[in-house]
Amino acid sequence: MIRTLAFAGYRSLRDLVVAVGPLTAITGGNGTGKSNVYRALRLLVDAADGQLARAFAKEGGMPSAMWAGAPSKKARESEGKRLSIGFADDSIAFELRLGLPKDARRSTAFLLDPVVKEETIRTLSKPRVSLLERRNATAMLRDEEGRPVTFGAEIDPGESVLSQLAEPHGYPVLSIVRERIRKWRFYHQIRTDADSPVRAVQIGTRTPVLAHDGHDLAAAMRVRCMKPSPMRLMGRASKSNSVASTRPLESSSFSFMRPACTGLSKAQSSPTARCAI
């Protein structure tokens, strides 16, 4: 599991390291940076999926996403501002450092895109071993036998190596880190309008983990509800009888059956309130 998150130079996060447990709640007043922690975490998934440039474009470009305060002494002495995102789990640490083109007028026509300055993967056990060392468009990583292999011009400078070298048999470390990140899920602002993916008809397939947009809710609930304890917890939480059903090659449905709400007029109330998806 994730043990540590580290973000620096991203929006209001000048330098933040968070120790993570099985359940971690980040609290604070408005404008303290809670949402930026969440968004920075999403950037790691975008890096694994090869969507860094698109993610920053949605934020108004790389300059809009970087720390707006005065650069640190280290940044002034090096190549300028940096935006860093990374995490560590039980065995490895991953870090991605981004910046702007050194000479934007000559290097690119896409002035708002991120440029990967450094990217590293290191083991946490001693002796610590560098499994990936990237500087700009040149990267060294270890193959399945632990031998260092160098890549150069074929690497996209605006995307993580994680999304560019996808041969699990040749570069198992990249494959492991990439798949670990891709298993993360973000349940935030799931649409509930009439055209929401959650309400669309879906063919039921075994779904151990709910998708980001919740479109496979019925199938995921059916897998969970095969065990009695989740059903009891749902019943206690909603004070209702809950039903999740799927049939092979047919659409899935999920519904709550609740007692009539008190305090409503007779015309407004009914014996049950059902939400079918």
Image: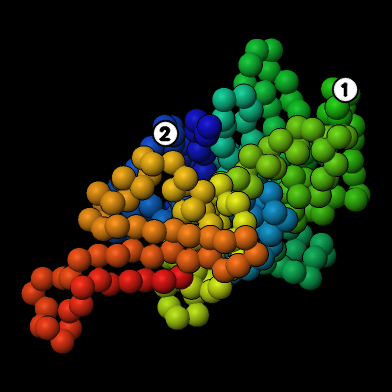
**Residue sitting at the far bottom:** 267
Residue 145 - label:
1
Q: Nearer the viewer, residue 245 or 186?
A: 245
Mark 1 against mark 2, which lies toward the viewer? 2
Q: Splitting the image into 4 quarters, where does residue 31 fall? A: bottom left
- Check the image and report above or below for 20 versus 213: above
**x%, y% of residue 87?**
56, 37
Residue in view at x 10 percent, y 83 percent: 265
| 213 left or right of 192 in image | right
**Residue sitting at the far top:** 127
Callout 2 amino acid? Pro
Residues at marks 1 and 2 touching, judged by CB atoms closer than 8 Å = no
Q: Is residue 100 visible?
A: no
**x%, y% of residue 226?**
47, 45
Q: Nearer the viewer, residue 32 or 240?
A: 240
How crowded is the residue under tag 1: few (<14 C-alpha within 10 Å), some, or many (20+)? few
Helix, strand, or loop for circle 1? loop
| 49 left or right of 90 in image | right
Q: Splitting the image into 4 quarters, where does residue 273 fall? A: bottom left
**Residue sitting at the far front:** 247
Callout 1 amino acid? Glu
Residue 240 - label:
none
Residue in view at x 57 percent, y 25 percent: 90
How crowded is the residue under tag 2: few (<14 C-alpha within 10 Å), some, or many (20+)? few
- Check the image and report above or below for 265 versus 246: below
For mark 2, what is the residue? 22
Q: Nearer the viewer, residue 224 or 28?
A: 224
CA separation in Å, label 1 and label 2: 34 Å
Helix, strand, or loop for circle 2? loop
**x%, y% of residue 71?**
53, 49
Residue in view at x 79 percent, y 70 percent: 109
